Amino acid sequence: MSLLTDKLYRYDAARNTRAAGIYPYFREIQSDQDTEVVINGKKVLMFGSNAYLGLTNHPKVKEAAINATKKYGTGMAGSRFLNGTLDIHVELEKKLAKFVGKEDAIVYSTGFNVNQGVISCITGREDYILWDELDHASIIEGARVSYSTKLKFRHNDMDSLEKQLQRCEPDKIKLIVIDGVFSMEGDISRLPEIIELAKKYNASVMVDEAHSLGVLGKNYSGKGLVEQCGLVDDVELIMGTFSKSLASLGGFIAGNEIILDYLRHNSRPYIFTASATPAATAAASAALDIIISEPERIKALWDITHYALDGFRERGFEIGHTSTPIIPLFIRDNEKTFLITKLLFEEGIFVNPVVSPAVAPSDTLIRFSLMATHTKEQVDIAFEKIESVFKKVGVLLHAKA
Ligand code: PMP
């Protein structure tokens, strides 16, 4: 065995779970993706998707992808910078900028590329990046690639953020980057307080709306947390992905023309990656049109979300501070989390295990997520199965008497 293979063999985190028969990853879906999917020839209820509005299967979204493929072909053989810009990329950018209320927007090939490519590009050696400890991995990756000083603050903790801001040199750039809705715990960032601190210390704020686009917004607008808080002018950069409510693949950054022009000419994951496929671009655009014209979908998402949140709380599940379609069911034990995932799958319920190193070993959880297309009957089945599996595995519930 080479030194490299030997080293990686010793670090194989999956071996134990495979040996125990509780390995939960790479389950192959063999059907279209809705609230029910087929895996291993068996129907299961899907409570692990990020397609919050249930649009991956929408006829108009599919048709847009098919028509774009027919017109433009299957792939972009080049980056946006050179031969990879289509008229539909530019149209989508304009539509997105208008939607979130910013001057301009740029579409990247994935949401991960946006965070990685924006954060690393606009901060330099003398600058600071301040990030919440539960921010998404792509934000951390962007910070890692940047030459700036990185300062982590405790999750949603304003005292911790202020202490870190006080450590920064006053006349240097300070970029605070946060998730609008945290991807595993489902709680919402304290944006109004963050903006107050940003103003006090002359910092810039970037919000990742991956899990809030198509979900939050005034009067079910789906425009995200920033718009819901009335802070569009105070947040300098708004980031979003197409891989969740927009039922596609890709991502965007929105902000003022000066920053975006700089990014267009300097952001490496924008310049050195092939641009988003015609199908992905057209699907995202069609999904955005549906979000704009059908607020009732977002209302349906919230109705089922409240039903599930109330149901889990009444049954005594520990679900932390979530108030969104992402519901963490805390287990606080790696092995049990894997075992519960497996047993639930056998009972026809698909959920995602979240274990260390994604979260601290004491914070492992089952991530249960909802779509606008879920019915109460489906959620009732999930309640019953999850309750019985938790009991079997010995996870205590604390139902009110
Ligand atoms: N930001 C957050 C908060 C995310 O949860 C994700 C994906 N899970 C991303 C960015 C990356 O998005 P994408 O999957 O589109 O690359």
Image: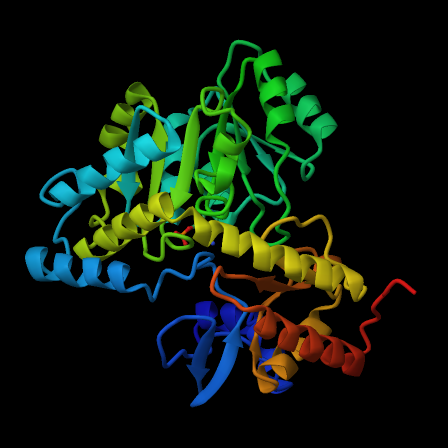
**Total numbered circles:** 0
280 vs 369, left or right, is: left
Work out whether residue 217 can be spotted.
no
Query: How was this image coloured?
Result: rainbow
* Vertical arrangement, residue 79 with respect to residue 305, above or below: above
Q: Quadrant of the N terminus?
A: bottom left
Point out residue 124 in the picture as x, y percentages from the top left corner: 42, 24
Q: Residue furthest top?
A: 171
Kindly identify the residue that appears in the image at 31 percent across and 23 percent down: 103
Kindly identify the residue that appears in the image at 65 percent across and 48 percent down: 323
Residue 339, quarter of picture: bottom right
Q: Residue furthest bottom?
A: 41
Point out residue 377 in the picture as x, y percentages from the top left corner: 59, 74
* Vertical arrangement, residue 92 with respect to residue 97, above or below: below
Q: In which quarter of the image is the C terminus?
A: bottom right
Point out residue 310 in the picture as x, y percentages from the top left corner: 72, 58
9 vs 159, left or right, is: left
Pick the front one: 314 or 204: 314
Work out whether residue 103 can be spotted.
yes
Kindly identify the residue that appears in the image at 45 percent across and 67 percent down: 4
Pick the front one: 338 or 94: 94
